[in-house]
Image (cartoon, rainbow, N blue to C red):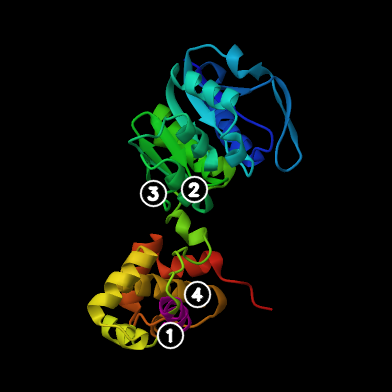
Amino acid sequence: MQRRVVAVIFEGFQGLDLTGPADVFALASLILGESRGYRLEVAAVHPGPVTAGNGVATLAPLALDQVTGPIDTLLVVGGLAAPAHVADRQLVAGISRLAGIADRVASVCNGALLLGEAGLLDGRRATTHWLSAQDLGDRYPAVEVDADRIYIRDGHVWTSAGVTAGIDLALALVATDHGHELARHVARGLVVYLHRPGGQSQFSTAMRTPVPRSEPLRELQTFIDANPAEDLSVPALARRAGMSERHFSRLFTEQTGVSPGRYVERSRADAARRLLEHTGHPLDRVARESGLGAAETLYRVFRRHWRVAPGDYRRRFRAKQS
């Protein structure tokens, strides 16, 4: 049977959040045949042209209150304007109603904020664009946010990371509906990964740890980030901060949300990432200069923080040299 996908858009939405999944479903339908493929319908609070953040207008033939069931997949897109639309009662109420008649609900990027506002993520694990992860968790504390995942399925609710992750999400939906072989054919046709290696933290900028309130701890945080190869053990850091080890560890954890050891490891991992992006140093030198010591440690830490090997990361992200 043909599967019905209803995509919800709003003024200022991210265009690729819609067109990426749409092309996945379209190619799957081409391979399967129209009767077994997907039928995509686009809806908004009011029918008519809806302008994306990139200025391209998309026609939404249906108003949300005109959509009736059954729906196989409700797909809520995101965009820079999504946080403002959380206050749109018609939009949120429409999403909530349609979720009640849909077999599954999915969001792309920070469209997760709209699912959260509708109460659809309470008690569930979810992800979103790394820039919106803290906002999602702060607004909706009942949601368990995993900021590194490309997409997450929790029951009948699927959420995905930013922008192009909507393609990953749609491929996973196709694989669930029709098997991995079809999803593999679609991925090859679109020249994308079927299963993208690593998590989305490999695409983010420097780690986002809260800045301590204490001036000595702020100075110490700056020192750690600037000197990854120094002795950054708890005793050494406590001496530099002029505190006892116990008091230092407690205060640092309280004001940054992570233990000193965890922060140092993350800072060194970030330093290693910069070296991989901007130098051609061999891995053992990258490990030494980033304070990780040996290439084996570099590999282990990189896999833990970014779920990708250092060599693979360098091949994809190394800055071109003039």
**Disc marking residue 146:** 3
Secondary structure state at the residue bearing disc 3 = loop
Q: Earlier in the sequence, mark 1 or mark 4?
A: 4
Mark 2 and mark 1 in contact? Answer it, CB < 8 Å: no
Mark 1 and mark 4 in contact? Answer it, CB < 8 Å: no
Q: Quadrant of residue 101?
A: top left
Q: Earlier in the sequence, mark 2 or mark 4?
A: 2
Q: Position of residue 299 (x, y in %)?
A: 35, 71
Q: Residues within 10 Å of mark 2 (few under 14, many from 20)?
A: some
- The residue that label 2 is drawn on is 135
**Residue pictured at 38% horizontal, 59% vertical:** 307
- The residue that label 4 is drawn on is 276
Q: Which residues are magenta?
A: 216-228
Q: Earlier in the sequence, mark 3 or mark 1?
A: 3
Q: Position of residue 216 (x, y in %)?
A: 42, 80
Question: What residue type is disc 2 on?
Answer: Asp
Q: Earlier in the sequence, mark 2 or mark 1?
A: 2
Q: Residues within 10 Å of mark 4 (few under 14, many from 20)?
A: many
